[in-house]
Amino acid sequence: MIELRYPIIEDAESYFRILTEGKFEYYHATIPESVDLEREWIKRREYKRENNLEYNYSIIYNNEVVGGCNIRIFQESPHIGEIGYFIDRKLFNKGVASKAVKELERIAFEELGLIRLEIRMDPRNKASEKVAIKCEFEKEGLLKKVMEFNGMYFDNLLYSKVK
Ligand SMILES: CC(C)(COP(=O)(O)OP(=O)(O)OC[C@H]1O[C@@H](n2cnc3c(N)ncnc32)[C@H](O)[C@@H]1OP(=O)(O)O)[C@@H](O)C(=O)NCCC(=O)NCCS
């Protein structure tokens, strides 16, 4: 139903639209300021992959980009990866993120050789927490003020799955 593939430059407009129109609450990530800057961001993904820093994927549904997801490798403990995701608001609650996480899990454990995967989210982000629960990640606890964003500090719930 969905497919993951590496982002290509042509995805920049979809990313920009999804991230700016989405007006996501509790999503502590930088929103691109222009399509051009989003193209630059996509160009840097290859460097990130080649240096085992981060693996980004576009989520494709009906031949369209409907979101993005990634596995970020913990540089101090490279057997650990953290999953992230965002979906076009028009397709919320149709199982797209959960399917993407299942595919990321396969990539992480079978292709990248990771041993531990984490999903962290703001405790108010109920949809994201539900994705972790549906994908059978285990709740480990609350990390207090672990996330710094725009000069503010946010708690995160920690979910994990180990191989
Ligand atoms: C989080 C996000 C990726 C989920 O994507 P999605 O494709 O809608 O996820 P799924 O459809 O697989 O699952 C969502 C689940 O959350 C549930 N849900 C949604 N809003 C909810 C709420 N306010 N309270 C409780 N459950 C909620 C849905 O009902 C669904 O569960 P169900 O399948 O049992 O009905 C999407 O909301 C998003 O892109 N948010 C903005 C970016 C973001 O917050 N990313 C995560 C950062 S940690």
Image: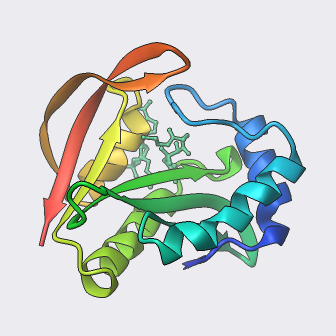
For the point 27% across and 86% down, which residue is it?
Answer: 110
- Please give left or right for residue 141 compared with residue 62 in the image: left
Quarter of the figure with the C terminus: bottom left
For the point 67% across and 50% down, which residue is it?
Answer: 88
Picture quarter containing residue 117? bottom left
Query: Which x, y percent locates residue 156?
Result: 30, 29
Query: Which x, y percent locates residue 150?
Result: 56, 19
For the point 73% across and 66% down, which residue is it?
Answer: 43
- Please give left or right for residue 85 compared with residue 78 in the image: right
Query: Which x, y percent locates residue 133?
Result: 25, 50
Picture quarter containing residue 8? bottom right
For the point 78% across and 37% down, which residue is it?
Answer: 21
Q: How many marks?
A: 0
Query: Which x, y percent locates residue 119?
Result: 30, 49
Quarter of the figure with the N terminus: bottom right
Of residue 86 and residue 46, the one placed in the foreground of this image is 46
Of residue 97 and residue 42, the one placed in the foreground of this image is 42
